[in-house]
Image (tube, rainbow, N blue to C red):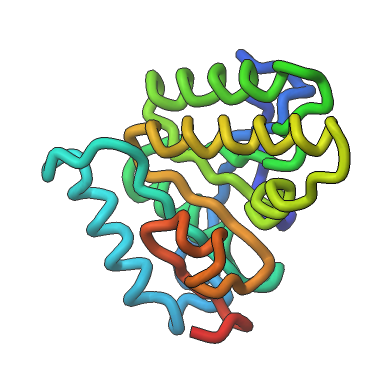
Amino acid sequence: MTPRIQANDLKAFGRSFPARELTTELAWRDVESYETIEDQLSELREDASNLRKKGYTGSYRVLFSGPPGTGKTLSGLLMGRESGRRVVYVDLPNLISQYIGETEKNLTKLLDRASAENWLLYFDEADALFSRRTQVKDAHGHYANQEVSYLLRRMEQFEDLVIFATNSCPDRNQALGSYFHRIIRFSGCPN
């Protein structure tokens, strides 16, 4: 995030919860790679507005990929603002707690509130989430995989657009890429 994007605590969750409401006065012209992704973002906005009209159930998962500073967070924020929704930024590595059972409670609380209040969820550092699934070296790693699997199942059931972001450039054939309905590659990621 940049100083021109403000992150505000969600009062109902407390300061320690790894989610913040984002606000900004910036516009689409301020997105670093807007010219290269304008058509893709336009298609995404159209998809998002048609989800409920077409009777789509489940989540519509989108991945914004590209190096830091290319406009991923700002693009998600502007999409939410355009649709009159609050955008809630979630720090994924911190959502997955080291305490048994906390991840499930945190995610359930977040998704229930997002659904009730029509929030647009923006999950940052998605690559950290997916890489955890493959690194099992001990019982803690096994439990972390269970938490990640739970999170992925819940995200699939969440009936709305959900934006994930990563600084890496995943291949569409990798597990990370195949989980998403759409991948938008910002400057620095090959198409």
Image location (x, y in percent) of residue 157: 38, 32
Residue in view at x 28 percent, y 66 percent: 43
Q: Is residue 134 left or right of residue 29?
A: right
Residue at 47% x, 76% y is 34
Q: Quadrant of residue 175?
A: bottom right
Report the front residue among 175 and 137: 137
What percent of the width, then of the height, locates residue 129?
68, 47
Quadrant of the drawing holding the N terminus: bottom right
Nearest to the observer: residue 177 or residue 3: 177
Q: Residue furthest right?
A: 138
Q: Residue furthest left?
A: 54
Above/below status of 16 relative to 140: above
How far across and how far down the image is residue 155, in percent? 47, 36
- Residue drawn 63% across and 52% down? 126
Q: Is residue 10 above or below residue 122?
A: above
- In the depicted structure, whether residue 103 falls above or below residue 33: above
Question: Seen in the image, is 66 located left or right of residue 138?
Answer: left
* Drawn side of residue 121 relative to residue 66, left or right: left
* Quadrant of res 103: top right
Where residue 128 appears, as percent x and y from the top left, is 72, 52
Q: How many marks?
A: 0
- Quadrant of res 16: top right
Image point (53%, 78%), residue name: 33
Question: Residue 55 versus residue 156: which sits nearer the camera?
Answer: 156
User: Could you say which is closer to the camera, residue 170 or residue 24?
Assistant: 170
